[in-house]
Amino acid sequence: MINARLQRSTTDLLPFHIAQFINSIESLNTKASTITKPTNSTTPIQTAIMQLTLLLSLLPLASAGYSYGAETTAASPSPSTAAQQQTVAGVTRINVGQNGLTMEPKDVTVPAGETIEFHFFTGSHSVAQSAFDSPCTPLAVNGTEGFFSGAQAVSSGEGANVFRVVSTGSPMWYYCATGRHCQGGMVGVINKP
């Protein structure tokens, strides 16, 4: 009997709480222009709105691959040819997974300040910086900052995302961190010593 009475009173109050919530939101809108000094306290609604705003602002970060300062952008569709793997206007192109577990070309020389573009093909691949003595371990694990594209899943052909890294002029080893792709030979080097 007490549980039924408690449940009924809670249900009866629900429309009241909804109306109170709506009135609070409306009063925030009408009072926004009349507030003259900040206060140190917030209402539960203001707190909820701030938390929701923070959560929504973090969503793009949560869904993006961690890049260690490198950049991932959409590429314009273009056919793949050997000529595109050459340096053009300070940009060197590397195809990731175009012909199976390959990085093409596997060995490039890129002067400091110029850009390397990684283009992803059918399957799920990634590019992670490693060290010469640990080719299948991300450089960041060894306590040094390195680049990582995050997984790039492509259903067919060339994917829309291009991962860009700026050359330091020093040797940079990299590999595909997906599954056992590295152990299958999916590795490369920029500025081999």
Image (tube, rainbow, N blue to C red):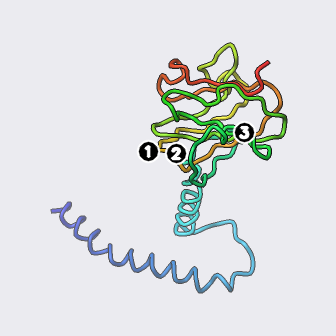
> In 3D space, how far apart are the residues under numbered discs 3 and 1 (Cα atoms)?
23 Å
Query: Residue 148 or 169: which is nearer the viewer?
Result: 169
Which three-letter amino acid code belongs to the residue tagged 3? Thr
* Cβ–Cβ under 8 Å for marks 3 and 1: no
Residue at the disc numbered 1: 156
Query: Residue 56 or 122: which is nearer the viewer?
Result: 122
Which three-letter amino acid code belongs to the residue tagged 1? Ser
> In 3D space, how far apart are the residues under numbered discs 2 and 1 (Cα atoms)?
7 Å
Quarter assignment of residue 190: top right
Q: Is residue 105 above or below residue 69?
A: above
Query: Residue 17 or 175: which is nearer the viewer?
Result: 175
Query: Residue 126 or 123: which is nearer the viewer?
Result: 123
Tag shown at residue 92: 3
Graded by Cα atoms within 10 Å as few (under 14), some (14 to 19) or many (20 or more), the crowding at tag 3 reads: many
Residue in the image at 44% along x and 45% along y = 156
Give the SS element for disc 2: strand
Residue at the disc numbered 2: 158
* Figure quadrant of the C terminus: top right
* Figure quadrant of the N terminus: bottom left
